[in-house]
Image: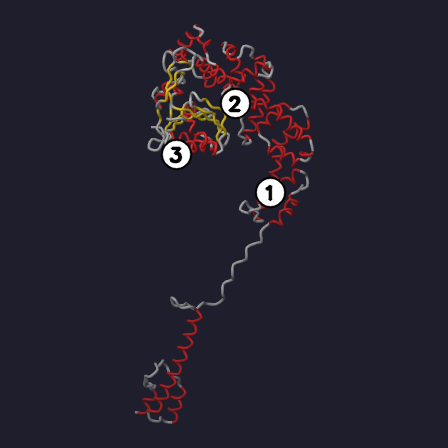
Amino acid sequence: MADYIYMMESRLTPDQQRAVALVQELARAQEMNVYLTGGAIRDIISGFPIRDLDFTVQGNALKLQRELEKAGAVLQGVDEDLRSMYVLLPGNVRSEMAMARSERYEKPGRPPQITSGTIIDDLRRRDFTINAMALSLNPGSRGLLLDPFNGAADIEAKLIRILHNYAFYEEPSRLIRAARFVNRFHFTLEERTQARFDAAREGNYIENISDRAVGYEIEQIAYEDDPLHLLRVYEKEGWLKVLNPHWSSGKVDGAALAQLLKTRQQMQNLGYTLDAAPAVMYFLTHRLGDRDIAAMQRLMPRKSFVETWRKLESDAKELARRLAGKEAATPSLAWQLLSRTRPETVLFLETTTRQAAVGQKIRNFFTKWRQVKDKLPLAEMTELHITPELPVYPKLTEDAFYLLLDGKLRSRAEILRFLKPFAPPPAPPPPLPKRGRATKAAPGVSAPAEAKHARIGKSQEAVAEQAAAKHAAQKRPSPAPSTAKKAHAKPAAKHVPAGRARPIRKSKSAARKKR
């Protein structure tokens, strides 16, 4: 059995993992069951990039709105009828949170009758089997995959399959969605699904599409890896006129769009997390009339998407003015200004600017200036004990980088002269060991006290030996002069304890003379 929790954690980005943990915690606090559903599960299993996260809760998802905003999330749109909301979670993670529901269509294209339901009811109402899966995030069942329509097998077979025969009749927007999935994943329509697709197109079911579905499908084009190719596919299939009657591939600024996508990839390689979709939509509709653009914007569900799209030109114009002025007169000042600016604005200005100096500063920001950081002598800084553990390290390296950018530090020697005053003093050397043999101390007794006791013991033993020798000399008879002289000349051979006298042994020669 596959470990879907491991698959989820290994496939999601760190920001997406934190977003899942946040929603899971807030739903648990509200005593709601929460599931990761739809496209996120499809992309986790298939290996395609995970663009956004869809959460389904058993209950009113709008109850989580206040707590999500307290945690730093940005509300991008709300649908009161469906009890769902579009949220930008911390880390620039796009997500949709919706109530688990069942739907009943009385007429095609008309809004369905919505009732609260279970997670299985919610999966049953979906479009294709590959989107009808859910992963439990609840205690006791976390990691359990719900796949009642065998969507994982269809992913393996690279098939797009509808859940029931009336799928295109009830929701005609699924015709456009099927074309989008075929283009993105290079899957094929399952045989029965293809037959129903052809019948729906002949029956002109698409004319019953709802305005909400049109706005959703327009927005989704901007998130594709190759949006212009998808636009041409829609144009060939006849779906582009459904989204807007005056829209065509000829209305696209193809050269600017290609440059935008190239710069977006460059920024992503540098570690930026950005939402380029509003800028993509700007170039996809560049030659459309203002009235058509306004009509498309009114239908889009994410109002923050529309607001960003509308402000692209004014924000870029303001950034260009600041880059051309004193605020960015030096490379270090320009670096700081561009670092503080939203990456989406930098991306759009790099694509659209006609000012050579402004464009050069942005290109240097992405390439040349970043290479200057490689000139910092990290090895020598480590020898000077200037390491990230120092509190001043971030500020110090930043100042050195700015001086390098402005040409005030040019060589490695100049950089080291700048850094040396900030090096911490060297640690004191360890104490030298004492010379000679150290007296082995008894446990619990210090070395000076032990030496003192040793000296006292030796003096007492010497006094006792002298007293014993004197007592023995007085008790024995006086020897012959020559013998006595030898006896007195010879020192005591052994130690005599205090208070106990031991006789002095005579030599063998003295004993023979006596006999």
Q: Which x, y percent locates residue 198?
A: 42, 8
Identify which amino acid the numbered label 3 is placed on. Answer: Ala
Q: Disc 3 on helix, strand or loop?
A: helix
When asked about the image quadrant of residue 501, the answer is: bottom left
User: Closer to the camera, 36 or 158?
Assistant: 36
Q: CA distance from mark 2 to mark 3?
A: 29 Å
Mark 2 touching mark 1, by CB under 8 A? no
The residue under the point 68% across, 39% down is: 407
> Which residue in the structure is indicated by mark 1?
397
Residue 116, percent from left and from top: 37, 22
Describe residue 374's horizontal placement relative to residue 212 as left or right.
Answer: right
Using a 10 Å C-alpha cutoff, classify the residue at mark 1 as few (fewer than 14 neighbours), some (14 to 19) or many (20 or more). Answer: some
Residue underneath mark 2: 303
Mark pair 2, 1: CA separation = 41 Å
Q: Nearer the viewer, mark 2 or mark 1?
A: 2
In the drawing, what numbered circle is on residue 29?
Answer: 3
| Quadrant in the picture for the N terminus | top left
Task: Identify the amino acid type marked 1.
Answer: Thr
Q: Amino acid at mark 2?
A: Lys
The extreme left residue here reads: 515
Judge left or right: residue 287 versus residue 495.
Answer: right
Q: Position of residue 275 (x, y in %)?
A: 53, 26
Disc on the earlier residue, 2 or 1: 2
Image quadrant assignment for residue 55: top left
Label number found at residue 183: none
Secondary structure of the residue carrying tag 1 is helix
| Dot 3 or dot 1, earlier in sequence | 3
| 3 and 1 marks in contact (CB < 8 Å) | no
Compared across the picture, whether 124 is left or right of 298 comes to left
